[in-house]
Image (cartoon, rainbow, N blue to C red):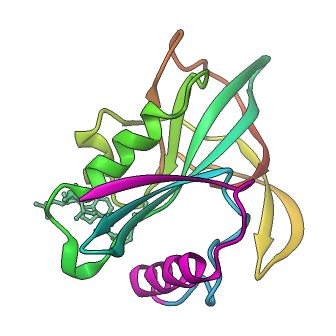
Amino acid sequence: MKLTDHSVADSPDPVRDAAIAGLLDACFGGMHGGRTFFKQVPHRRVLAWSRGGIVGHVGMDLRAMRVSDSTMHVLGIVDLCVAPTARRQGIGAALLQAAEERAEGQSFALSMADDPRLYRRAGYSRIHAADVTFLAIDELRCHSVVRRDLSEIFMAKRLAGGAWPDGPIDLLGHLF
Ligand SMILES: CC(C)(COP(=O)(O)OP(=O)(O)OC[C@H]1O[C@@H](n2cnc3c(N)ncnc32)[C@H](O)[C@@H]1OP(=O)(O)O)[C@@H](O)C(=O)NCCC(=O)NCCS
């Protein structure tokens, strides 16, 4: 298995993009609608390759956000996925670790995860996120700024610096 790095500033590669879009649709039940992203193009991606094909993907959203009065620089984990035929071989965990290692200068990695298993094993824990403000995007349209209790999905791992501060969270953008 080989990992490669990609940035939003790279030259377009239609063949690679079609493979990423195909993987996302296969892993997320078609909700990406044939795109290489769901809500917004991630700043960076790490791809996992096996026998010349893409078998895994993680997007990296690098963001400044607010927690109470603090400005935090975070890595948002986006669209972590592995092809169904390549699962349970450690590729998902390797992609998550690769994203964290490439997030120099970010103090936390964040993921919105219904299923916490992979993240817990990698050192993430649930955050009390009772008051989160974010930009709601649906079907490629911003429709409102909303406040929600996301404590059931909000997971974080400290990469550098101090502990997660208490208080309301403003994502200064969409939900990862
Ligand atoms: C989640 C996913 C990326 C894991 O990839 P993987 O290469 O199989 O991961 P690893 O081999 O490193 O680890 C496997 C473990 O991940 C955990 N896991 C499985 N599905 C998971 C999920 N949807 N979310 C979180 N953890 C999951 C399980 O504990 C599994 O081990 P187990 O089956 O022995 O209990 C892959 O199952 C996938 O693409 N799922 C569909 C897309 C998805 O739900 N992505 C997560 C978005 S938050």
Q: Nearer the viewer, residue 30 or 13?
A: 13
Residue at image position (79%, 17%) is 69
Where's ligand 1: which quadrant?
bottom left
Q: Determine if residue 156 is in view.
A: no
Q: Is residue 159 above or below residue 44?
A: above
Residue 113 placement: quadrant: bottom left
**Residue 10 among those drawn in magenta:** yes
Q: Determine if residue 51 is in view.
A: yes
Residue 84 placement: quadrant: bottom left
Residue 89: x percent and y percent?
Answer: 14, 61
Residue 68: x percent and y percent?
Answer: 75, 22
Magenta range: 1-29
Q: Nearer the viewer, residue 102 or 143?
A: 102
Farthest residue in the left direction?
89
Residue at image position (60%, 82%) is 32
Residue 41 placement: quadrant: bottom right
Q: Is residue 150 left or right of residue 153?
A: right
